Image (tube, grey):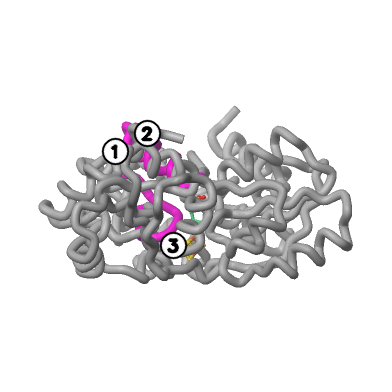
């Protein structure tokens, strides 16, 4: 079979997979870019790491790995590719660079931020440490490298409780997500001192909204991200990181499910679980949605938007991320 034929077949295969969630008119725009990106990836020995909130044409069309933030950090440390294109938000790309400093790490849009990461600075953490001398700092990975540099150990929503308990202390400063801190506090005896950051996507969900959906769908399973407010988590059947939500649906195959999180993820998971019905109230992350195929192609072609972290900050920040990955899930 010639190369052109193989490429056409692989595009057809991708569209067959995502046709339930991507209209044909959109596919006509995506297909040529997917083909060009996949070709360029091979030519440049690049790998595309994508977060679970990326759109289906990215998640199923060009990503080599699609996962939660913990797995993206681990995959970044293991890759043998020369270039990592991180399709997600800025802190994820910075974390990839920390984990594998010799690689060129690119992000398709430098403006892909995060409300949690921008809620706190390194200076704020220094102030907290002065206020609570000797109390260790656990930072959510959704923070800048400056904040990670002031941190004892990072965590993600997949291992927050485990990380806090690993320290063997009776009190920790846990930042910046107030709701994740609340979730951790419910699951540990360690006293949690929290910051007031929130995720602009997850804070919008309400317990009432979730309860109403359950009333209308008595047979539904409701799974929430721990960045949600406590009344939402209380009204849910399970709470966990984006990858543990994916795993829950894959293993339990509920008849009907509500993923209380960024809504693009439901499309991605639906593709892989055609027998599950997804109820989708839609809250989009405007930062995640800054990434698209055209920007991926341009940044890989021009090797632009490279992540740079100053040597001193990187050395300190790397330790807190590595301590987290040693603990695992
Ligand atoms: P996960 O680590 O669960 O993928 O979450 C990252 C995130 O930004 C959720 O809003
Ligand atoms: Fe940040 Fe929330 Fe977007 Fe995740 S969904 S990247 S926490 S703003």
Q: Is residue 305 visible?
A: yes
Residue at (32%, 36%) from the top-left corner? 77
Q: CA distance from mark 1 to mark 3?
A: 20 Å
Q: Position of residue 289 (x, y in %)?
A: 52, 66
Q: Residue at x 79, y 42 (%)?
A: 274
Residue occupying the point 36% across, 36% down: 166
The answer to whether one can see residue 301 in this image is no
Mark sitting earlier along the chain (1/3): 3
What residue is shown with label 2? Answer: 327
Task: Decide if residue 202 is on the left or right side of residue 139.
Answer: right
Residue 281: image quadrant is bottom right
* The quarter of the displayed image where residue 303 is located: bottom left
Task: Give the residue number, with chain letter if any, for mark 3.
Answer: 177
Callout 1: SS: helix
Q: Nearer the viewer, residue 311 or 149?
A: 149
Residue 78 lies in the magenta stretch:
yes
Q: Are marks 1 and 2 in contact (CB under 8 Å)?
A: yes
Mark-to-mark CA distance, 1 and 2: 7 Å
Ligand 2 lies under 8 Å from the Cβ of mark 3: yes
Is 12 left, or right, of 296 in this rendering? right
| Mark 3 secondary-structure assignment | loop
**Label 1, residues with CA under 10 Å away: few <14, some 14-19, many ≥20:** some
Q: Residues within 10 Å of mark 2 (few under 14, many from 20)?
A: few
């Amino acid at each position: 079979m010639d190369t052109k034929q193989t490429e056409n077949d692989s595009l057809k295969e991708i569209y067959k997979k995502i046709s339930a969630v991507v209209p044909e008119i959109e596919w006509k725009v995506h297909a040529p870019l997917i083909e060009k990106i996949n070709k360029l990836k091979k030519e440049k020995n690049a790998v595309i790491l994508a977060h679970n909130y990326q759109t289906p044409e990215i998640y199923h069309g060009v990503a080599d790995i699609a996962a939660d933030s913990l797995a993206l950090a681990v995959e970044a440390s293991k890759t043998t590719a020369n270039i990592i294109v991180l399709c997600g938000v800025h802190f994820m790309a910075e974390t990839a660079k920390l984990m594998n400093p010799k690689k060129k790490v690119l992000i398709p849009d430098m403006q892909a931020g995060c409300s949690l990461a921008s809620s706190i600075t390194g200076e704020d953490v220094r102030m907290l440490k002065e206020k609570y001398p000797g109390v260790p700092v656990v930072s959510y990975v959704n923070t800048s490298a400056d904040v990670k540099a002031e941190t004892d150990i990072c965590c993600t929503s997949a291992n927050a409780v485990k990380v806090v308990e690993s320290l063997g202390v009776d009190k920790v400063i846990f930042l910046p997500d107030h709701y994740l801190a609340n979730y951790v506090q419910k699951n540990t005896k360690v006293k949690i001192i929290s910051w007031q950051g929130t995720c602009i996507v997850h804070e919008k969900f309400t317990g009432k909204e979730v309860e109403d959906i359950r009333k209308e769908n008595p047979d539904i399973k409701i799974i929430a991200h721990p960045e949600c407010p406590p009344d939402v988590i209380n009204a849910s059947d399970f709470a966990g990181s984006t990858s543990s939500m994916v795993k829950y649906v894959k293993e339990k195959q509920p008849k009907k499910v509500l993923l209380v999180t960024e809504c693009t993820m439901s499309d991605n998971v639906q593709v892989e679980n055609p027998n599950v019905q997804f109820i989708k109230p839609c809250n989009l992350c405007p930062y995640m949605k800054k990434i698209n195929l055209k920007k991926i192609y341009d940044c890989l072609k021009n090797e632009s938007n490279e992540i740079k972290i100053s040597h001193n900050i990187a050395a300190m920040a790397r330790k807190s991320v590595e301590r987290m990955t040693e603990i695992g899930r």
